[in-house]
Image (cartoon, helix red, strand yellow):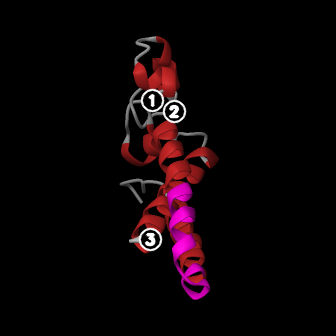
């Protein structure tokens, strides 16, 4: 269970890091999404449109803020669960975390190819 959790959290962490490197426009470049939508670079402007429970408590309900919460609580839970495993398994968890963060970052930063090339 901890292996799956750390892989998913690290993948989300890598995607979030790559998303930031690209000026939060990765999904716009890759999938042509609306800049003001959940995946867009200007989604933070929706915070002022309708302040709901999520906005007041965690921030805007968009990819960046939701992924930030997933990463934070996922790593905390993984760290807690690592208290119950031996040191060899901890090395596996660390390696998986590094590999899946790299995979996530590489995936999000790879731009959509132009149809003419």
Tag 2, which secondary structure? loop
Mark 3 vs mark 2, foreground winner is: 3
Real-space Cα distance between discs 1 and 3? 35 Å
Local SS, label 3: helix
Q: Is residue 71 magenta?
A: no
Query: Mark 3 — residue?
Result: 2
Q: Position of residue 112 (x, y in %)?
A: 42, 54
- Which secondary structure is most common in the magenta stretch? helix
Whether residues under marks 1 and 2 lie with C-beta atoms below 8 angstroms apart, the answer is yes
Q: Which residues are magenta?
A: 75-90
Q: Quadrant of residue 33?
A: top left
| Label located before the other in sequence (1 or 2) | 1
- Pointer 2 residue: 41
Callout 1 secondary element? loop
Q: Nearer the viewer, mark 1 or mark 3?
A: 3
N-term-proximal mark, 1 vs 3: 3
Quadrant placement of the N terminus: bottom left
**Whether residue 50 is situated above or below residue 114 in the rendered picture:** above
Q: Which mark is residue 20?
A: none
The alpha-carbon separation of the residues under discs 1 and 2 comes to 5 Å
The one nearer the camera, 41 or 77, is 77
Question: Residue 35 got which mark?
Answer: 1
Q: Does residue 105 lie above or below 4 as drawn?
A: above
Residue drawn at x 46%, y 40% as measured from the top left: 66
- Residue at image position (46%, 68%) is 7
Residue depicted at 44% across the width and 33% down the height: 62
Label 3 environment density (alpha carbons within 10 Å; few <14, some 14–19, many ≥20) = some
Q: CA distance from mark 3 to mark 2?
A: 32 Å
For the residues labelled 1 and 3, say whether their Cβ atoms are less than 8 Å apart.
no
């Amino acid at each position: 269970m901890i292996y799956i959790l750390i892989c998913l959290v690290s993948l989300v962490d890598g995607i979030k890091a790559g998303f930031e490197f690209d000026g939060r426009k990765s999904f716009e470049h890759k999938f042509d999404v609306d800049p003001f939508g959940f995946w867009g670079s200007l989604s933070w402007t929706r915070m002022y449109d309708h302040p709901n429970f999520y906005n007041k408590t965690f921030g805007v309900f968009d990819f960046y803020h939701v992924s930030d919460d997933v990463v934070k609580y996922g790593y905390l839970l993984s760290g807690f669960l690592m208290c119950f495993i031996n040191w060899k398994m901890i090395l596996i968890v660390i390696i998986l975390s590094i590999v899946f963060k790299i995979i996530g970052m590489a995936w999000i930063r790879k731009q959509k190819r132009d149809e003419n090339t």
